[in-house]
Amino acid sequence: MNKQIIEEFRANGGRVGGWFEEARLLLLTTTGARSGAPHTTPLGYLPDGGERVLVIASAGGAPRDPQWFRNVLADPLVTVEDGVFTYRARAEVLAGVERDRAFARAAEADPGWADYQDRSGRVLPVVALVPLPGPPTPAAASPGAALKSVHDAFRRELASIRREVDAAGSTVGAQLRVNCLTLCQGLRHHHRGEDERVFPWLAGARPDLAPALDRLAAEHRTMAALLDELGKILAAADTDPAVLRAEVARLTGAVEAHLTYEEEQLLPVLDASA
C-alpha cells in the first residue's frame, strides 16, 4: 500500500486519491537503523508556523513505534518530499510541554490521533522536521511547471483550510489557527520572492510584460492587506468562526484569481526563457 501511495504522490505532484485524497501528506526518507538503506514512508503532517512541519509516530495505533521513527532516533538527517520540493531536514523529537501542546493541538483538530494513542498503549512521539540550510530541489522539470506546482500547492492548502473552517464549531481550534497562519506566512514568502527576484528579472528581459507585472505587484499588495486582516482575526482569543469563514473565503477568491492570471501571463514566458 505504501509503495502505491509513494508512486502516485511522486507522479502527481503530491496529490493522491482514495482515503488520503484530502490529507496533508509528505514522503519521509530515513536511513535504516540496521540496514543503512533508504526507507521511504508516506506520512500525514501538521503545519507548524512555516519553519517546520510536525509528524506523529502513530503506526496506526500499533503498540510499537514505527520503523521510520526508530530510524530517526539512530540518524536524524532525513529527506522530505512535499510534492513541490525535495529538501534535507533534521528530525527533532519533541519532549515535555512542547510535545504535549503539539499533540493536544493535533487531537483537538482530529480526535483520531487521541484514539491511536489510546489503542497503542504508548505516548505517541511527535517529531518536527526542520529544513537544513540551502535551497530545496523543485520536483518539476521546468520553471513554468515549478511555478504551477507551487500555485497548485497553495490551492490545495486553501481548500483544506476552507473545509476545516466550515467544519469548525463554536470555537476556532489551536491547530486551525496554526494552519491559517502557516498559509499566510507561505503566501507572504512566495510573493516577496516574486517581488524581489522574479518580477525584476522578467521586467529586464521582457519590457512588454510591464503592465502585467504592475498588476501582479498591485495584487500582492492587496493580498498583503487581506493577510494582515486575517492575522488580526486569528489573534483574537474569541475568534468568531463565521467571521473567519468569510475572511478565508475572501482571501481564497483573491488568491485564486491572482494565481490564474499570473499563470496565463508568465508560464509561457518562463518556459520559453528556460
Image (cartoon, grey):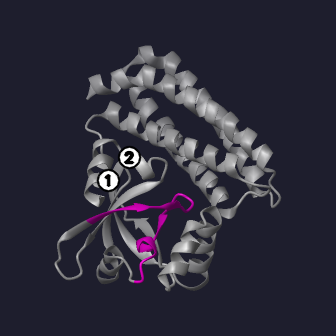
Farthest residue toward the top? Answer: 208
Q: Position of residue 118 (x, y in %)?
A: 55, 80
Q: What is the crowding at mark 1: few (fewer than 14 residues within 10 Å), some, or many (at least 20)?
A: some
Farthest residue toward the front? Answer: 119
Q: What is the crowding at mark 2: few (fewer than 14 residues within 10 Å), some, or many (at least 20)?
A: many
Residue 134 is inside the magenta segment: no
SS of the residue under disc 1? helix
Proximity of marks 1 and 2: CB atoms separated by less than 8 Å: yes
- Residue 162 lies in quadrant: top right
Is residue 186 among the parts visible in the rendering?
Answer: yes
Residue 53 is inside the magenta segment: yes
Q: Position of residue 52 (x, y in %)?
A: 48, 63
Q: Position of residue 16 (x, y in %)?
A: 38, 46
In the rendered image, which quarter contains the C terminus?
Answer: top left
- Residue 90 lies in quadrant: bottom left
Which residue is more in the foreground, 89 or 13? 13
In the rendered image, which quarter contains the N terminus?
Answer: bottom left
Number of the label disc, if any, that sits on residue 186: none
**What residue is pinned by disc 2?**
16
Would you say 12 lies left or right of 234 here? left
Does 215 sit above or below residue 139? above
Residue at 30% across / 60% down in the picture? 2
Q: Position of residue 267 (x, y in %)?
A: 37, 25
Disc 1 marks a residue whose amino acid type is: Ile
**What residue is pinned by disc 1?**
5
Disc 2 marks a residue whose amino acid type is: Val
Which residue is more in the foreground, 210 or 18? 18
Per the rendered image, the range of residues in magenta is 40-63
